[in-house]
Image (spheres, rainbow, N blue to C red):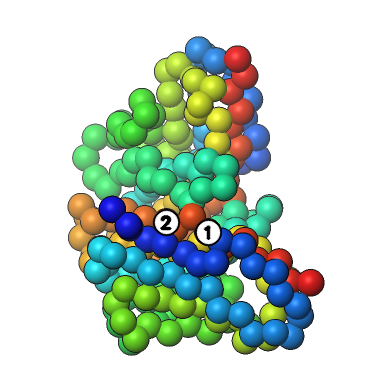
């Protein structure tokens, strides 16, 4: 079985400060890992993904995420937060040895960037 | 581009009534998905489809029915709506399996209230 945990329901950060949104995962094989963002009254939008290769993945809007296999983590980061980054962030995982099974999403973390 | 569209945007219905949520995508994506989003639960998969006439249950399929007679459409029907089905419903699609295609595109959602 595959699962994702986002341990923080809410993250608050001051504008200009670095931000981290945490994610840990569990799969039986090797993971495909994703981050999606949801702005108010909108559907989710793809931010970035890790399939294989470099552990540091760069995505949209200046976000990046670091894959750590030993800690089974895939934390989302940004060096300098903007007020416009305030949104709901979802981590998702799929075991790439499991065929066509769909993504499993975490419960989401609400990021608030304060001016 | 039209992308993926859901209708209606908002729906209010009564317990016991049948209601159908529509989803249409213009990319000819093979895979389509229905998720529901609830506070404290994040996104949960209801049903998905790998191609026309192929559907599979997700995590929470009870009380829902899907069909996929055409690649571009994936309607979700609540046969006899219950209050527990009050939620925001998201449709998503992606291209055929392949690492470079591993990316979901989401509709804007349908907010359903069952009274």
Rendered location of residue A30, percent (x, y): 32, 54
- How many discs mark residues in the rendered view? 2
Residue B59 relative to residue B40: left or right = left
The residue under the point 38% across, 45% down is A46
The residue under the point 59% across, 50% down is A107
Which quarter shows the C terminus of chain A? top right
Q: Which chain is indicated by disc 2? A: B
Q: Is residue A8 above or below residue A1?
A: above
Rendered location of residue A25, percent (x, y): 47, 49
Q: Residues within 10 Å of mark 2 (few under 14, many from 20)?
A: many
Quarter holding residue A110: top right
Q: Is residue B108 above or below residue B20?
A: above
The residue under the point 43% across, 80% down is B56
Asked whether the residues under the numbered discs 1 and 2 touch, taking CB atoms below 8 Å apart as contact, a structural biologist would say yes
> Which mark, residue B109?
1
Q: Which chain is indicated by disc 1? A: B
Q: Is residue B15 above or below residue B90?
A: below
Rendered location of residue A53, percent (x, y): 21, 40
Element under label 1?
A: loop
Q: Is residue A94 visible?
A: no
Residue extending farthest to the top is: A16
Residue A43 relative to residue A98: left or right = right
Quarter holding residue B63: bottom right
Q: Residues within 10 Å of mark 1 (few under 14, many from 20)?
A: many
Residue position marked by numbered label 2 in the rendering: B106
Rendered location of residue B16, percent (x, y): 74, 85
> Which mark, residue B52?
none
Element under label 2?
A: strand
The residue under the point 70% across, 84% down is B17
Mark 1 vs mark 2, CA separation in Å: 8 Å
Q: Is residue B28 visible?
A: yes
Depth order, front residue of B31/B79:
B79
């Amino acid at each position: 079985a595959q699962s994702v945990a986002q341990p923080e329901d809410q993250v608050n950060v001051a504008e200009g400060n670095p931000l981290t949104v945490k994610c840990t995962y569990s799969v039986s094989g090797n993971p495909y890992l994703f981050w999606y963002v949801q702005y108010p009254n909108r559907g989710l939008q793809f931010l970035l993904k890790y399939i294989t290769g470099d552990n540091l993945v760069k995505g949209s809007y200046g976000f990046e995420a670091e894959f750590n296999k030993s800690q089974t983590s895939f934390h989302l980061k940004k060096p300098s937060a903007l007020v416009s980054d305030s949104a709901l962030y979802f981590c998702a995982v799929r075991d790439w040895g499991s065929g066509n099974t769909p993504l499993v999403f975490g419960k989401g973390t609400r990021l608030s960037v304060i001016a | 581009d039209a992308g993926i569209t859901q209708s209606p945007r908002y729906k209010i219905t009564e317990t016991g009534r049948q209601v159908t949520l529509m989803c249409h995508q213009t990319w000819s994506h093979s895979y389509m998905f229905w998720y529901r989003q609830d506070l404290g639960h994040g996104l949960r998969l209801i049903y998905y489809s790998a191609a026309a006439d192929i559907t599979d249950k997700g995590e929470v399929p009870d009380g829902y029915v899907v069909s996929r007679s055409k690649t571009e459409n994936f309607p979700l029907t609540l046969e006899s709506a219950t209050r527990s089905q009050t939620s925001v419903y998201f449709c998503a699609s992606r291209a055929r399996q392949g690492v470079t295609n591993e990316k979901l595109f989401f509709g804007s959602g349908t907010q359903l209230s069952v009274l």
